[in-house]
Every structure is written in C-alpha cells, then in structure tokens.
C-alpha cells in the first residue's frame, strides 16, 4: 500500500516535530510548513492526502489557508483537519463553514487520538 501523505502546517516547531515523528512511525509520509503561505504552496505542489492545520499562523492564518485551498481546483478535495488551541463555538463554526473536515482542540487530544482521527478521515 502506498503511504498516505500528510501536510502538517504548524508554527510550533516542537509540536510539528512530535507530530512528524509520531505520524512517520505510524506509517505516514509527512511534509511540513511553519507558516500559512508556505503551507498553501506545499499543498499545491505535493497534493497531500490530508492536511493537519493550525489556525494561529504567521503570514497567513489557518482560515485563509482553508479558504485558499478549498478554492483551488487541485486542492479543494483534500480533507483538512484543524488542530488548534482556539476552542470557541464561533471558531469551530467558521472553520467547518469554510470546509474543514474536523476540528480538534490541541489540549483535548493526545497524538494517538489525532492519528486515529486521521485514519478515520482517510478510511484506513
């Protein structure tokens, strides 16, 4: 089976590294971006199977990344899971309204649970 590619757009390098190591160990291929602009660029180039996206990002926030990727023919069907610290109902509704597949609040989920969610979304 071909490895599923996950794009991690996260500006916290410690969390990004932890996610990368964990997902790689789980058999995924990962690519990463530290800001929203770079994330969109990599998303268009690499066409990942799924995007793990933070909202609070430098250069372009997660909502803009979501809007941009959902508006692009090449990336609009890629599932996007938001993994963020913003937990208000407004944030969740806004993200889902813009096309996010799932919304996870960092503090509420362990890496194992994030991985399980990814596998659910990708039907693995």
Image (spheres, rainbow, N blue to C red):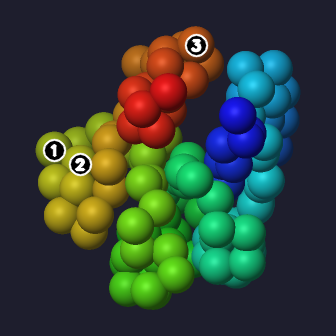
Q: Which residue is found at the position 69% from the left and 48% from the top?
A: 5
Residue located beneath label 2 in the image? 92
Q: CA distance from mark 3 to mark 2?
A: 22 Å
Asked if residue 12 shows in the view, the reply is: no
Left-right relation of 115 to 42? left
Give percent across and percent down for residue 69.
47, 76
| Tag 1–tag 2 contact (CB < 8 Å) | yes
Give percent across and percent down for residue 102.
32, 42
| Tag 3–tag 1 contact (CB < 8 Å) | no
Q: On the image, which quarter does residue 38 sit in?
A: bottom right
| Mark 3 nearby-residue class (10 Å; few <14, some 14–19, many ≥20) | few
Q: Earlier in the sequence, mark 3 or mark 2?
A: 2
User: Which residue is more in the foreground, 106 or 41?
Assistant: 41
Q: Earlier in the sequence, mark 3 or mark 1?
A: 1
Q: CA distance from mark 3 to mark 1?
A: 25 Å
**Which of the two discs, 3 and 1, sits closer to the camera?**
3
Give percent across and percent down for residue 81.
44, 46
Compared to 2, does 21 lie above or below? above
Residue located beneath label 1 in the image? 89
Q: Which residue is found at the position 16% from the left and 54% from the top?
A: 93
Q: Which residue is found at the position 46% from the left and 38% from the top?
A: 122
Compared to 60, does 47 lie above or below? above
| Badge number at residue 73 | none
| Mark 1 nearby-residue class (10 Å; few <14, some 14–19, many ≥20) | few
Compared to 98, does 23 lie above or below? above
Left-right relation of 90 to 60? left
Left-right relation of 55 to 93? right
Residue located beneath label 3 in the image? 112
Q: Which residue is found at the position 52% from the left and 81% from the top?
A: 74
Label 1's element? helix
**Which of the two discs, 3 and 2, sits closer to the camera?**
3
């Amino acid at each position: 089976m071909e490895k599923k590619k996950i794009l991690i757009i996260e500006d916290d390098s410690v969390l990004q590294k932890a996610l990368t190591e964990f997902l790689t160990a789980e058999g995924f291929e990962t690519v990463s971006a530290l800001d929203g602009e770079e994330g969109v660029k990599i998303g268009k180039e690499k066409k990942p199977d799924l995007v793990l996206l933070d909202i609070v990002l430098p250069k372009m926030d997660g909502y803009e990344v979501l809007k941009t990727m959902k508006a692009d023919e090449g990336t609009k069907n890629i599932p996007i899971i938001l993994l963020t610290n913003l937990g208000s109902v407004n944030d969740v509704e806004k993200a889902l309204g813009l096309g996010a597949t799932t919304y996870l609040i960092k503090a509420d989920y362990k890496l194992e649970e994030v991985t399980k969610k990814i596998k659910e979304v990708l039907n693995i």
